[in-house]
Image (cartoon, coloured by chain):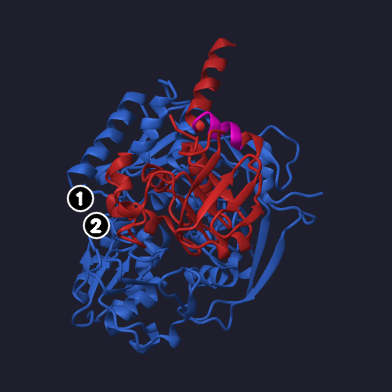
Amino acid sequence: MVDTHSAHGTAPLQFNGRVWKFGSHIDTDVIIPARYLTTTDPSELARHCMEGIDPEFSRKCAPGDLIIAGPNFGCGSSREHAPIAIRAAGISCVIARNFARIFYRNALNIGLPIVEAPEEAIETAEEGDVVFMDLVKGVLMNLTKGTSYHTMPIPDFMQKLLESGGLIPYVRTRCRTDTQH
Amino acid sequence: MGMTITEKILAGHSGQESVAPGQVIQVRVDLALANDITGPLAIERFYETGATRVFAPEKVVLVADHFTPNKDVESANQCKRVRAFAEEQGLLYFFEGGDAGVEHALLPEQGLIIPGDVIVGADSHTCTYGAFGAFATGVGSTDLAAVMVLGELWLRVPETIRLVFHGRLPPWVEAKDLILCAIRDLGVDGARYCTLEFSGNTIEALGMAGRMTMANMAVEAGAKNGIFEVVPSTEEYSRGRQKREGVCYSSDLDASYRETRHYEVSALTPLVALPYSPDNVKSIYEVTQTPIDQVFIGSCTNGRIEDLRSAASVLKGRRVAQGVRLIVIPATPECYRMALKEGLLELFLDAGAIIGPPTCGPCLGGHLGILADGERAVSTTNRNFPGRMGGALSEVYLTNPAVAAASAILGRIGGPEEVL
């Protein structure tokens, strides 16, 4: 369902790519304005990804790129169209100081890798930098700047969720098990 | 160690004697909700799980309220998918057409919100129901799909921040100002992952509409839920509506809080959240020279009959300023009917207002009141992010209904005492 392998790396949940940099409190209205919520089609949503803050974003961003942003990324509405748009735009991983609660759940549920990183790692990263992110080991390397940071390793439960492609495959397994018993 | 209201509800719904903040638990869900935007996605995900039936047809509620009355072919198709699912699953509570209203105003009216319940909605303002002493939180469509299948949700038990309000509200200061005051203080991420528990003698005197306004905006401080103790006004509101008996919890005296903040409200002025963040809050008297193009009175935050009455008390016998569009939307059919009976709709028409059908429409820049680029609106809603109500360069100023009404008359931001 979801390719959690990076374009360049071979291990799961490792990502290597170019950085798009955003500020603090990036809300879901700017990630995907409500006027586009008349569809659930990922490629259509991707065309308008981040339109509320950078109308050119979907044209500029390439598969495997990463987003680095400040605190409270994804605040506001519960629209899952936001992480879907980001993933469908080709973004491999979102690194932020921290995430709004509903966005955090939504991203993991649909299999969009996200991770919290230290303030310095966020502040020093610039647009166009190339970074390497290992979600399992909790290591973020800024290859352009030659710096390395520890990030919060993702909990086992979340790792399983991401590796199985999100919550739906998990529920499917649960349903099957429940029927068997 | 004692527990808070939220901890007691979560313990009861996860089959445990007690729970503590940070603990990850699986909770039983009493009510699951989606709308015409989040519903279609949740329904797709539901089928992807391989499930064929929802866990309980009386516990899954669907409301067509965001892009309704259908604004275009795409939104009509989304509603059609939601309707088909409701029929297929035999859902007891599917609201559309003349039965629909803004979900978070509608469900309490319908008696579906029960104290002590766990309510999960694919809409961030689901936290509104905390006004009734229920644990209610917003999730995305995939989470909601999982709930529709399993009737359960995993949650991390939140820490609780207690907000205590003291004193009598001054004239024209309303519940909206109390929550804006708290969001200013906490910041838009100050309560991330936490519960906001509201108490104090100001809150004791507050009716259900005001409690809903406050719980509604808990998410604007990043909170997981907002919650109030059940009081006589809760019971009075719910009498004759509530579908079944609930459980009324209070926080223990030795419950633990992340922090407690006290607010003295007797010197508070009406407040406004300036673009582009709900925590960018100032006294309205700091921005009275701000000219406006539109005023919107409505939404799950402030579209109830009490809100319309407050606006009407300012608009009565007056006219909206030249060049300003005033849009009034009663949040539900019941509210619409009451406004009609009480003569409020005529009063609004006399003032030059446009009256819309119950819908979320303008609040999220959906339809029925979109702002042009660079236009400025005063709105009784909950968010003022860039482009929230229309053009990317438009601006939204969040206020209470009385201030919104006064601003419509003045053609700029201003207080009711300026026009009365």
Picture residue at 34% right of the left edge, 84% below the top: B290
Picture quarter containing residue B38?
top left
Judging from the image, mark 1 belongs to the subunit labelled: B
Q: Quadrant of residue B110?
A: top left
Report the disc number at residue B367.
Answer: 2
Q: Label 2: how many residues lie within 10 Å, few (<14), some (14-19) or many (20+)?
A: many
> Is disc 1 placed on a helix, strand or loop?
loop
Q: Decide which of A74, B161 is in the foreground and name it.
A: A74
Residue B277 at x, y percent in the picture: 45, 69
Looking at the rendered image, the quarter that the C terminus of chain B falls into is: bottom left
Give the prevailing secondary structure in the magenta stretch. Answer: helix
The range drawn in magenta is A158-165
Q: From the viewer's perspective, is residue B165 above or below residue B106?
A: below
Tell me, yes or no, if residue B211 can be seen here: no
Give the residue displayed 35% in from the left and 82% down from the top.
B413
Q: Colour of chain B?
A: blue
CA distance for labels 1 and 2: 7 Å
